[in-house]
Every structure is written in structure tokens, then in C-alpha cells.
Amino acid sequence: MTEGSISKKLILFAIPLFLGQLLQQLYNVVDSIVVGNVLGKEALAAVSTTGSLIFLLVGFINGLFMGASVIIGKRYGAKDYDGLSTAVHTGITFALLMGLAMTVIGVLFTPTILKLMGTPADVLPNSILYFRIYFLGGVGNVMYNACTGVFQAVGDSKRPLYYLAISTVINTVLDLLFVACMGLGIGGAALATIIAQAVSAALAFVKLTRVAGPHRIRISELNLDKLTLEKELGIGLPTGIQNSVIAIGNVVVQSNINAFGSAAMAGCGSYFKLEGFVFLPIICMTMALTTFVSQNIGAQQYDRVHKGTLIGTLITVSGAELIGVITVIWAPVFLRMFSKEADVLAIGVSQARTESLFYFMLATSHALASVYRGAGKTKVPMIVMLSSWCLLRITYITITVHFIPVINVIFWAYPITWTTSTIIFIIYYFKANWLQKAETL
């Protein structure tokens, strides 16, 4: 990432990321397609309502590991291989411990959280079952993402793709086997997912123990280096907090959606699955930007950081708006994969056509946030996204839905808050001395 054509480096790095994230999205998409078409809208609503809760815990832990990825990338760019090895072993050890913690928390507190969200009685039992089984596989989920973060930080976005392809095939086959053939219901869909995640985690971890390079894992060296962990948490904790608080905001949003009934839950859940799917190219380009910025700051190539930011953001925004236009046109076709029930489809299409033309705003926010994270300035995206994507979004929805009890009010919360965060990020980029203050860790 520190030499050669910037656009070529970013695109070639992002393509395997895109394919890998595409396969990872298929986990939940396959679950939703099989569940929605075999078990009906109540079961689909149960899967959909767990999404915010899953992101609440997974997002926090993956955010914590962002600190390790940034430090690994900077030390790789600076050719500090001893420091890089320490960061890898500390990060992987911490991820293992957090995976275990996530399992315990997810299993114990599922019913309480779902009830606080106002999950309807006809959906609650299936939601609890799916959520608890999903989090029994918490270690596999976190460890795969941690190992992937190591590969990506040193510029390798291909190996994780291979392992994920295998596990996605396993997930699809097991979904059909457990749900459609064996009649295990929603629990079968969750079981298929955690088995597939465990396979991908095992493959990635084993490869890291055998790879030739400074990022190789040695089992005997897995430990928590206090100084390194403090640095990783100093960078990663703001992102973890950001993810969790935004997830709490999404839980509040989901609670408002729940009030409109199971058709609204299923329709909005289908759209969120679609959004996560079609927006993948954008997310992957921003992930590439984080690695690009961290390595080039480590190599002290600051002009290249600015050029990469401009090029990466332009690519991201252009791609986002193209995707938005396609989504507006083809939303009914895409959403029909999840459910063919008219009321579910109508709500999902309405949300898609309200939000998707504003993807360019969402893309700009993601791109600039990824640049600041790559520079180790993770508090900036945390503050901006918490204030706009959480506080502003919740305030707007709570007040407006009270006076205008129409579900479209909720849909407009997203374009409004995307625009707000984009404006703040752009002002910070040009007014703050963020790059000159970036540390080489």
C-alpha cells in the first residue's frame, strides 16, 4: 500500500474484501430467504429483530479489534516487525477472551433485552431461540473477524476470502438441510450459521500459525502485553463504544418498528438485509482506505495519505450512488427474495426507495471515518456518529413518530443523520490538524 498506483492498490485490495464480505452477508441472507419462504413472516420477523442485538455485541468487540488492526498496519508500514508480532499476539488473545464473554452475555441476557425492545409475543420465542443459539458460536464469530483483521492489516485480503467461501457453502447446505429437510425451524438456521462461522475461524487461525511473515501466530506467545493492549484499546475502544451505542440506537429504532407489527418488522428487516448486501462494495473500499492510511502513516508518506483519501472517497461515493439508483429501480425484485407477502413487500420497497438515493451521503461518512480510524483518530468518528447516528436519530424518531405515527417517518431518519455526519466530517478534514498529529504506533 505504500508504493505504486493508489487507485489500483485500493481497488485490488478491495475486490477480495468485497467478495469475502459478500459471502459473509450470505450467512444472514440465506437464513432470511430460507426462513421467510419456509417458515413464514413471523419467523422472518424473529430473525430480523435479532440483527440490532447481534451488532450490539459483535460490533463492540470488532470495534475493539480495530485498534489492533491500525497498530499492526502502522508497524508493518514502518517495518517494525517485532512490535507487529506483539500486536498480533495481544490482539488475538484479547479477541479469544472477548468471544467467550460475548457468548455468556448473549445467552444470559437475550430474553430481557428482547422484552425491553417490545418484541411482539408471537415473535418472542423464536427470537430468543435464534439469538441464544447464534451467540453460542460467539468465539468463532469474533476469532474469524480478528484473524481477518490481521491479514488485512498487512495487505492480504485474499486468504480470508478462500476460507469464507468454504464456510458459506457449508452454511447454505446446512440451512437447507436443517430447516427445509429436517424441520428444525429457526433454531436450525442459527445452528447452520454458527457451524459455518466456526469453520471459517478455524481455517483462518490455523493459516496464521503457518504463514511465513512477521504476522505469524505462535501458540506459545499468545498473551496480553500490557503496553500494547493499552494502545490497542486506546484506538479500538472508541470504535467499540461507537458501534455499541449506535447499535443501542438501532435497538430503539427497532422498538419503534416493532410497534407497527410483524409485517413492518419483516419488511424493514428485509430491507436492512438488502442494504447490507448492496452496499458491500462501498464498505470494502472504506476498509481498504483504513489499511492504506495506516500503512502510509507508518511509512510517513503523508502526501500519499491525502491523495489516497481523495481517490478512495471519489470511488466510494460514485459507486454508492450507482447502487442507490439500481436499488430504487429494482427494489421490488430484490425484496421479493425474502417474502412475497404483499404487506411485507410494500413496507420494504417504501423504505428502499426513501433511503437509497442518499447512499452517497452514507458513503462519504464511511470513507472519511475510515481515514480517521486509519490515522488512529478513532475518537472523531465515535463522537460524530454517536451525536448524529444515535442521539439525533433517536430524538427525531421519538418526537416525530409521537405526532406523526407513520412508519415512513422512521425511514427518513437515515438520510437526515447521514447528511449531518457527512457535513461534520468534511469540516473536520479541512479545519483540523488531524494528519500531522497522527502517531506512529
Image (cartoon, rainbow, N blue to C red):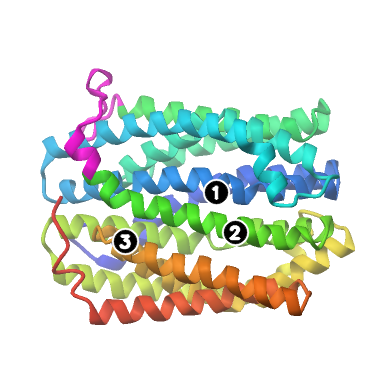
Residue of label 3: 379
Pointer 1: residues within 10 angstroms few (<14), some, or many (20+)? some
Q: SS for tag 3?
A: helix
Q: SS for tag 1?
A: helix
User: What's drawn in magenta, residue-wise?
Assistant: 209-230
Q: Image quadrant of residue 90?
A: top left
User: Which residue appears at 58% of the width and 38% of the height?
Assistant: 168
Look at discs 3 and 1 and give the one toward the viewer.
Answer: 3
Based on the picture, tell me whether residue 132 belongs to the magenta stretch. no
User: Which residue appears at 42% of the width and 45% of the height?
Assistant: 62
Q: Image quadrant of residue 412?
A: bottom right
Q: In the displayed image of the protein, which residue is found farthest to the right?
A: 342
Mark nearer the N terminus (3 vs 2): 2
Q: Position of residue 125 (x, y in %)?
A: 79, 37
Q: Is residue 1 visible?
A: yes
User: Which residue appears at 54% of the width and 63% of the height?
Assistant: 279
Q: SS for tag 2?
A: helix
How much space separates mark 2 and mark 1, taking CA atoms? Answer: 9 Å
The disc label shown at residue 250, or none: 2
Based on the picture, tell me whether residue 212 belongs to the magenta stretch. yes
Q: Where is residue 87 in the image (x, y as percent from the top left)?
A: 22, 38
Camera-side residue of 10 and 407: 407
Q: Position of residue 312 (x, y in %)?
A: 34, 69
